[in-house]
Amino acid sequence: MKIIAVTSCPVGAAHTYMAAAALEKGAKKAGHEIQVETQGSLGFKNKHGREEITAADVLVLACDVACLERERFDGLPVLETSTKKCIKDPGAVIEQALEKVK
């Protein structure tokens, strides 16, 4: 499966990037591709373009604040969660996201 994700937290620092790293590790361990966009204090990093969005099977929104430019993802199955859940158990988050595709 191809997964795309967006992570963000109120401060846009530690949890944003910790959640991104955890999701990348969890997806790799489960044998799935993932691309993570962070919306942190430094702005967008690894911003998803039309090509990545079109190729994706599911979107994980690990946002503790509003996801910016969310309309880009219209039409994709979405799992909304928190950065804390991603950091604590990324494998479970990946499993829940894949359930959205079935």
Image: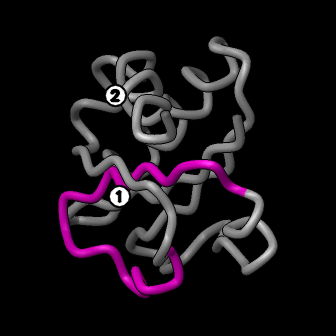
Residue 26 location, quadrant: top right
Q: How is the image coloured?
A: one colour
As for residue 95 lying within the magenta part, the answer is no
Q: Which residue is mark 1?
A: 13
Looking at the image, is 101 positioned above or below residue 6? above
Left or right, 23 with reference to 96: right
Provide residue 22's location: percent of width, then percent of height. 48, 29
Provide residue 49's location: percent of width, then percent of height. 72, 78
Mark earlier in primary sequence (1, 2): 1
Q: Which residue is mark 2?
A: 87
Identify which residue is drawn at 43% across, 36% down. Answer: 97
Magenta-tinted stretch: 56-73
Provide residue 29's location: percent of width, then percent of height. 65, 12
Looking at the image, is 89 positioned above or below residue 14? above
* Secondary element type, mark 1: loop
As measured in the structure, the alpha-carbon distance from the residue carrying label 1 to the one carrying label 2 is: 14 Å
Q: Amino acid at mark 1?
A: Ala
Provide residue 28's location: percent of width, then percent of height. 69, 21
Q: Amino acid at mark 2?
A: Ile
As for residue 67 lying within the magenta part, the answer is yes
Neighbour tally class for label 2: few under 14, some 14-19, many 20 plus, Cα within 10 Å: many
What is the residue that sits farthest to the top in this orientation?
29
